[in-house]
Amino acid sequence: AGLYIPGGKAAYPSSLLMNVIPAQVAGVEEIVVCTPAPDNELNELLLAACHLCKVTQVYRVGGASAIGAMAYGTETIPKVDVITGPGNIFVATAKKLVYGEVNIDMIAGPSEIGILADETAREDYLAIDLLSQAEHDEMASSILITTDEELANKVSDKVEAFLGTLSREEIARKSIEERGAIIVASDMDEAISLMNEIAPEHLEVVTKDPMALLDSIKHAGAIFLGENTPEPIGDYVAGPNHTLPTGGTAKFYSPLSVDNFLKKSSIISMSKPRKPARKRYRGKERRSGQEKVRVNFTLHEENVRNASGSPWVPPEKRSKTQYRKLNPLNNTLHRRYRRVFGVEKPFNNAKMEFVGSTVDSHGKTTYWYRDRRRGKVKISLDNPQLQVYLEHALKNKLPISSYG
């Protein structure tokens, strides 16, 4: 697995943990880490996290170049099967382009936060939470949707006041000015509908009863309920993975987990017949759907013949007696027919119409049919498997004398 850990503008040891730990739990044997190295030096905390996780392959390369190197391999960096980890717009675009050559976790681009708030929310809390993502990247997105216009104006003033106190004011200000928004909705239903369309990476619900709104929220990477659960709680305290889908892809992507490092296969196995057929049907060159079905029936009959010790007779040369010997089901149906109708010759089920079935108090099923010659008749079978066979034969107009 190839893990991309951002580090161009800040170091994120937590992102390393969030990517390495699920990979190790999934049993990934080889882990390759690529991260930017400003001034050609790696952050000490990032290296310490690599040491704790026993990661031995760390390469000082970032951006789209790192994604390409892990996807296709170089003389130094091995090719991987899956690439995970967040990054800027260039990293997210590169992951999108190499998808298919390798698997990717999601489109995890510039950070996003969305906040749903009503009149009970505190404006200073909301302003700080909006800036918590704006300071990550100039292309980060911070959006507040509220039902209270007065609250919206207060939050806007608080954002401006807090901007001047940030060490990364220039980055945060550009993010707020170009990709920030405060929207006033007519009611909470409209606010939730709009937020579901945005599908933010992080969504805070700061209302009087946030749990009541949870069922209405359909698309978000991570949801934080109540004013006491700001977004950094999810990044560093609560425990869920903070590598989350961005750019509206939360509509179809989920947070990074062990599942991103696993794949599934369908496993099929058939048991052998009790006595395997010693001969195979010679007409294998017939490939139409009808003939394939015929081959299956023939092989079944051959297995019955092997079990009984009867000589092999091709289907087209069998007499009625020979055919019945090779098909115990047909014999049973003929016996049932003679018992019900008192005649030897099998009836022509093409003239039979299935009416319905009834179940008595003992659980015995009776099938009712309408015969043009005899009126309404019934057929009762004790064997449930024979009931299913008979019903299938009559409904599909299969001749019972050759149904096996």
Image (cartoon, grey):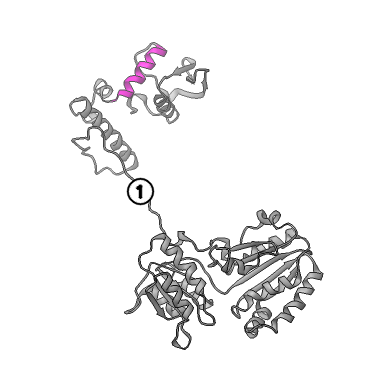
- In the displayed structure, 124 sits above or below 60; it is above
Residue sitting nearer the eye, 402 or 208:
208
Residue 200 visible in the displayed image: no
Instruction: Tell me the residue that label 1 is attached to.
Output: 267
SS label for mark 1: loop
Name the residue at 59% across, 78% down.
136
Residue sitting nearer the eye, 125 or 148:
125
User: Residue 332 lies in magenta, yes or no?
Assistant: yes
Q: Which residues are magenta?
A: 327-341
Q: Which quadrant does the C terminus fall into?
A: top left
Secondary structure predominantly adopted by residues drawn in magenta: helix
Residue 135 visible in the displayed image: yes
Quarter of image, res 350: top left
Mark 1 residue type: Ile
Residue 171: x percent and y percent? Answer: 62, 83
List the single residue furthest toward the right.
Answer: 150
Q: Is residue 34 left or right of residue 92?
A: left
Residue 299: x percent and y percent? Answer: 26, 35
- In the displayed structure, 285 sits above or below 331; it is below
Residue sitting nearer the eye, 316 or 251:
251
Q: Is residue 198 left or right of residue 271?
A: right
Q: How many marks?
A: 1
Q: Which quadrant does the N terminus fall into?
A: bottom left
Q: Is residue 335 left or right of residue 196?
A: left
Name the residue at 58% across, 66% down.
237
Name the residue at 55% across, 62% down.
240
Name the residue at 54% across, 82% down.
9
User: Residue 119 lies in magenta, yes or no?
Assistant: no
Residue 286: x percent and y percent? Answer: 27, 42
Quarter of image, res 239: bottom right
Residue sitting nearer the eye, 178 or 116:
116
Q: Using a 10 Å C-alpha cutoff, classify the residue at mark 1 as few (fewer than 14 neighbours), some (14 to 19) or many (20 or more).
A: few
